[in-house]
Structure formats: structure tokens, C-alpha cells
Amino acid sequence: MNILSIETSCDETAVSIVRADGDFPNATYAVLGNALFSQIDIHREYGGVFPAVAKREHAKTLVPMLEKALTEAELLSKKESSLPEEKSSELYTILHREPGLGEMLIHFLEQHEVPKIDLISVTSGPGLEPALWVGINFARALATHWNIPIVPINHMEGHVLSSIFTENKIPEISFPALALLISGGHTELVLMKNWGDYTRIGETRDDAVGEAFDKVARMIGLPYPGGPEIGTRAQSARDNNLPTFITLPRPMLDADNLDFSFSGLKTAVRYAVQDKELSPDDIASIAREFEDSVTEVLLKISVKAIEVHNVQTLIVGGGVSANTHIRETFTSFFTAEYPHLAVYFPPRNLSTDNSIMIALAGHAHTAQARTGEQFAEVKADGNLPIGAHE
Ligand code: KG4
Ligand code: ZN
């Protein structure tokens, strides 16, 4: 089957076409088309993501991404026609909250034959609701027009699948598995007893890790998104053995639960830097200490969860899993101390938000696909917990 997937939960507008041969989890996948537009340059000016700006940009970019992905997949052929009045007014009704998108989509549909797509998979949460709605309404318009089903997808489950996706397959993994999901909006530990069986066993009490990276970066004068910036500076501090500028706590290590807390790190950095002129070395040194603290906390709390739940497989996912220091520290620690634990990190291009992961999750949930009149059940939920739509 050919799956068209749509991701608009935050600041990436992404559309992919993935062909699945076989049933989940034993299928072979082929990424036929993959189009992604990152709004990072637009949000950088504001120092973070503004939902209304993200929504506007998604509405502008979805049709070009659709066209790019379908072209790459060689599923697009030209025609010239005009949609009957009732068809275009149906599409305008579905897209009435997305200014401009209705016109662009109708124009696109009038110029192209119906492509061979069997299912539309779209992120329905968690994320920024105005941004999620653009993707959902776009999916509803396409699915209505093409008369195919839609499957709503949890973005975090997408991250789990993109972390293990290897050589176009979902590998066989041993359960229980533990997913450490670290992104701009989320930090959680999820226990998986089987495919689709998710229990959240730990989460952040305050800021998400990615959010802490972004906020600390901003305080020390680094641009958005802060994660990669801090990573580079921290590495140069290690390479050059720079002196310590600040010593940060390792929050929550002594707690008798599996939760995280990162806002204290941010506050500690704020006090340490206020009213100070920071040299490039000071900035690098702060970045190193912050990254060390976060890495140690993530590692030690994961180890606690692995011990308590007899975990066989560790899956690290979400944008922060792109971090080199976290990857290297985890890999060398677990290779030495837990040689039987299988550890997965996503390939670099699938660590941050993308739509390939939404196609994989869509394939896992084909049984939950909605048709026709059930499209109204597909709704954005900014706080959708993983596993909730089972
Ligand atoms: O998963 P993601 O792309 O979007 C959300 O679902 O939130 O994660 C984005 C987050 C941002 O906070 C960004 O700073 C962080 O991931 N990030 C990183 C790195 N690359 C992205 N954090 C640390 N190191 C990185 N290399
Ligand atoms: Zn994400």
C-alpha cells in the first residue's frame, strides 16, 4: 500500500509517500517521496516557535510539499480540468480556517490526476494545536476528494518508530522496551510491553529537555534552536579543555520515581550569567556543563527504569536524540555495562520531526483508519498522550 503522510505538529511542514509491502511489523518499506520544509529560519527571528506563525507557514507550504513528494514518488501526472462547483465548495468548507490553502489545493487538484495513494496518515497530537489542525484539515480535504481513509497518528509514537527504522524495515525487538523520548515539547520514559502497548512511566515535571536546551542557549546568546548550538559549543569546550565557568546540579537523581525536571538548570544558568559579559570560552564552558548535566540525568534515570522494569531494548527518540554527546555517552555506557541491551538511536535525518515516521506509525495503525463520515473524529489534541488512541 502507498501511504501519504503529513506532519505539521510544530515547525516542520513535511509530506512523504511511503510504500509498505506486507503487514506491520514485518513489512518492507520504500520511501518513494519525502518533502520537508523547516520553518526554523522564520522562527529564529522570534527566538522560538509562535503557533500562529507556524500555522500560517504550514498553510503556505503544504501544497508545494505535497507536489514535491508526489513528483519524487513518480505518482503525479498532469491534466487540465476544473472541479465541479460542489466539489470545490466541499474543499473550501473543510479548509475554511486555513486561508489560501483551499485555493492552492483546488488549483493543484485541477492540474493533476488522482495519484495512487491508499491511506493518509496525519499527526493529530501532541503539538501546537493551530499547527496540527492545518495538517488535519488538509488530510481531510485530500481524503474526502480522493475517497480514501485517514489514520490519526501520535507524533511521539512516530519518534519511537523512526528511531528503530533500519534498512527499510522495523527490526524485531525484544520486549519490554523502554522509549526515552526527548524533544522540544516532551521528555518522557515510555514502557512498551508490545507493539502499540505504551505506558508512560516517567515524565518531566516542568521543561522538556529540548526546551531547556533552547532556553539556556538563548540566555547565553545563542540562536534558536539551541540544541545543535549548545552541542557544538560544548564539544569545543571539551576539545580545548576549557576551565569550569559554572557547576550545575543533576536534578531528580535521588527521587524515588522516574520523573525529570530541567527548569532548575535553566534558573541556575540565569543567575550565573546575569549582568555578566560572557566570552566565547565562557559560553562554551556553560554549554558543556549544561550538556553534561542533562546527559547524566537522562542516562541515570533511564538506567533506573531499565533495572526496575527488566528492559531488553532501549529506544531513544525525539529531536534531542540528535545530540552527539548524548549518543556517544549512552552508546559507550550501555555497550560496557549492559551488553545485552539493544540500544536504538534514530538515523540523523529522522531524529528531528519528519513525516516518514508518521507513515510508519500510520502503517502500524491501519486498523484504526477512519473513512468518510468518521473524518470528523480526527481532531487535533495538543496534549495527546502516547497510546491514547488504542
Ligand atoms: O522532535 P523535535 O524536532 O520537535 C518536537 O517534537 O519538539 O525536537 C526539537 C528539539 C529542539 O528543542 C532542538 O533544540 C532539539 O530538539 N535539538 C537538539 C539537537 N537537535 C535538535 N538538542 C540537542 N542537540 C541537538 N543536536
Ligand atoms: Zn518531534
Image: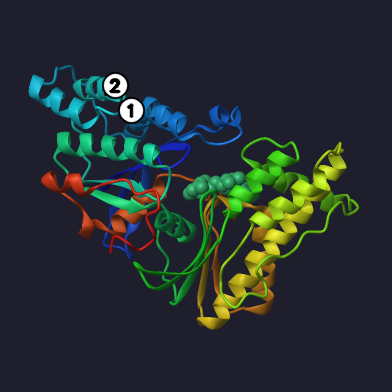
Q: Amino acid at mark 1?
A: Val
Q: Amino acid at mark 2?
A: Met
**Which residue position holds label 1?**
63
Q: Quadrant of residue 28?
A: bottom left
Residue 84 visible somewhere in the drawing: no
Q: Quadrant of residue 54?
A: top left
Percent of width and height locating residue 236: 81, 47
Q: Which residue shows up at 76% across the image and 40% down it?
A: 220
Between 278 and 165, the one lying in front of the other is 278
Q: Along the horizontal axis of the image, is 64 left or right of 79?
A: right
Percent of width and height locating residue 102: 25, 24
* Label 1–label 2 contact, CB within 8 A: yes
Above or below — where is 206 with respect to 12? below
Percent of width and height locating residue 315: 51, 65
The quadrant of the picture occupied by the C terminus is: bottom left
**Crowding at label 1, few (<14), some or many (≥20) Cα neighbours within 10 Å?**
many
Above or below — where is 110 with respect to 321? above
**Which residue position holds label 2?**
104
Percent of width and height locating residue 271: 78, 48
